Every structure is written in structure tokens, then in C-alpha cells.
Image: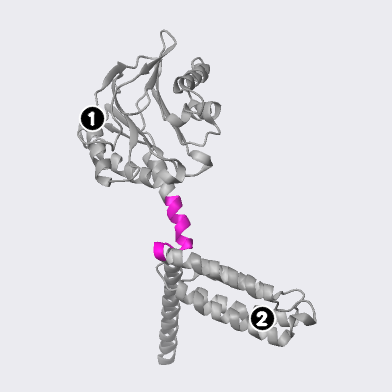
Amino acid sequence: MARGSAADAYTARSRKAVHRARIALRKSGVDYFRGDGSDWIALAGLLLTIPAFTWGTIVLPVWVSPAALVLPIVAGGLLLRPASLLGLYAGAAAALIIEAVVLGPYTEGPARVTPGTVLTVAACGFFGLLIAQFRARVGVPWRRGGTMLFDLRERIRVQSALPRLPGGWHREMSLRPAGGQSFSGDFVVAARTNGGRTLEVVLTDVSGKGMDAASRALLLSGAFGGLLGSLPPHGFLPAANGYLLRQDWDEGFATSIHLVLDLDSGDYELLSAGHLPALQLHAGSGRWEEKDTEGPLLGVYDGAQFDPVKGSLRPGDVLMLFTDGLVEASGRDISEGIDRLTGEADRYVLSGFEGAAWHLIEAVAKDVNDDRALLLLCREA
């Protein structure tokens, strides 16, 4: 019995030790992926590849070129910190020396270490070191940087999602960044306030295009999302204007339009900060009406006043908000772009505007090198 109990205790201790080792290894892998752990595992693995390449070059020089050492060097530039990278470079330099001694002078035949091979390996090492130093300065390793960018893009998308509306209403929106990129200087924040009876939507166009404006758009979308619903409707744009002024950006202005819609009656107010007018389709007449309101750009001067314009959406009416990238083009007046947009939108009057936002951007401004955003609100007949 005593012998069996000792064996069981030893087995239990072994299982616990294996379990702790697996947890530690998993934690180390997760930390390394996030950029929080040590890079010694990657360094050890890459250092082991150098003797393998050296052996292959000496034994099979035709198949394994001396320039193959650039492979661990390139991988090291992506995986390692600058200090560890220097150690890898020292190993690669030693491998080149060994290969040159064993294979003999490059003048005696092919598949030897030539000056071009040395220059190629050195150039790859130099650029890898620059990349590693840049990552170290930014503080985001490559294996985490892509995840962060993806997360930022998804946050912008979630923040731009319109809330669900009650029956009798249809809403949709489409955002198209400049140049087919994933980040845009146009964004939307929206919320249902007043116990869900009011829809507030803010469409903003940050100065700049694409990636240049994306970082500011991300910051502003978070700030505007916090302000929306926390302030009375007429207090939003003055607060947003003050926020931009406090940032003190060199190119810090933005245009914005704020919609406050009563979902019970269909009555609405529009407040604009230098933004293009909204367009309303009147179902009775089939005509589009520009709903224009005066207001200065956000981030230009303090104490700006924003006066509202009022309207009402009756059954069958449509309200369209958009940014200048949709209607503005070189050599063409904005009014011509608006006419083209309304002309294309007329195609959906009879069939309904389901899925129309994306198609309108495709038809009106598919390949424009500017950020484009279009928002549609329809009161069903």
C-alpha cells in the first residue's frame, strides 16, 4: 500500500509539474505575441538556423547560396529587438567568414562568398536594424501592430454603426476611404436619446484624406461619441468646436452636420458646422430640397454660433447626408455633383432605398481619391 501511495503521489506531482510548464509556455507565447515578453526564444531559433545554412552552403553550395543568410536576418528584423538583432548579426558575420575560408576565394569558381554576397547580407541587416529601431521607438512590435490597426478599424466601424430604429423607419450608411484604404477621415456617431424617441446623428469630415486624417478621425469619433447624448442638442457643436480648439492641431479643422430627429413625429433639426447641405426627398412632389444652414468650421475660432434649420419627414420622404468627397471633383462645381447625386438617387424612388447608399457611391464617386460617406434615413410610406 505504501509503495502504491508513493507511486500515485509521484504521478500527481509529475502531472502538476507538466501542467505548470504548459501554462508557463503558453503565457510566454501570448506575452511574446503581444510584445510584452522576452525575445530570447526567437533569437535562439534564428541563431540555430545560421549553422544550418552554413552547413548547407559548405556541403551543397549550388543549392544553398551564401546569400541565404539574409533569411534569418530579415526574420530577425521583424521579430527581435535591436540589442538581440546585433547578436544575430554577429553570428551571421561569423558564418560568412567560415564559409569564405572553407569554400575558398570567390575567384576560383561559382557558389562562393563574393563581395556582392557580403553587400547583400549587410544591406538587409542595415534595413532590418532600422525597422527594429523604429518599432522600439514606437513601442509596438510588428506582430502586435497589425492587430492594433485591425482593432482600430473595427472600433471606427462599430462607432459608426447606426442604432436600430423603430418600425416605419429605414436607415443605412456607407463609408468609402480614399484610395481603397481601411481608414477614413469621414466618420459618423449616432445615438438614440430622450428615452429612445429621438435619433441624433453627427456626420463629420476631418481635414485631410485617408491615413493622414484617420488618426484625428479616430480621436474625434471617440470624443464626439462621448459628447453626443450627454449634452442638449444645441450644445453639441459648440462643445465639439471647443474640443478641436484645445487640440491645437496644425490642420485641425473639420466640417460636421448634426441631425436631431423625432422618431414619433418625423420633425427634425439640422445644425451645420461648415458642412454641405442635407438633401430631402419629398414623396408628394418627387423633388429634392436642399436643407442648408449656416455655421463656421469646427476648430477655427472660439464662441462660434450654430443656427438650426427645421424640417419634417413625412411618410415616403428620404433625408440624405453626405460628405464633399461624394460630390466634389476638380473642374466641376459642387452643385453639379449634387445634381448628379440626386439624379442617381431618383432611380431608387420607386424600388425603395434598400442598399442604395453603397450603390450611390459606386455610381457617383467610385474612384475619387477622397474619403466619401453617405447616410440615408427613410420614413416608410
Q: Quadrant of the C terminus?
A: top left
Marks 1/2 in contact by CB < 8 Å: the verdict is no
- Residue at horizontal 44 percent and vertical 77 percent from the top: 21
329 or 358: which is nearer to us? 329
Q: Please tell me how crowded label 1 is: few (under 14), some (14-19), or many (20+) other residues with Cα within 10 Å.
A: some
In the image, what residue type sits under mark 1? Pro
Indicate which label's residue lies in the foreground, 1 or 2: 2
Can residue 202 be seen here?
no
Q: In the picture shown, does residue 136 fall above or below 10? A: above
Pick the front one: 355 or 359: 359
306 w.r.t. 239: above or below: above
Residue picked out by circle 2: 54
Per the rendering, the mark at residue 80 is: none
Could you tell me residue 236's position as x and y percent? 24, 33
Q: Nearer the viewer, residue 269 or 87?
A: 87
Left or right: 45 with respect to 313?
right
In the rendered structure, which disc, 1 or 2, sits on the residue that comes first in sequence?
A: 2
The secondary structure type at the circle numbered 2 is: helix
Task: Give how far across and how far down residue 151 sits, in percent.
Answer: 42, 51
Magenta residues span: 137-151
Q: Residue at 37% across / 34% down in the picture?
A: 162
Under mark 2, the amino acid is Thr
Q: Position of residue 379 (x, y in %)?
A: 38, 19
Q: Which residue is mark 1?
A: 233
Residue at point 28%, 46% (across, down)? 248
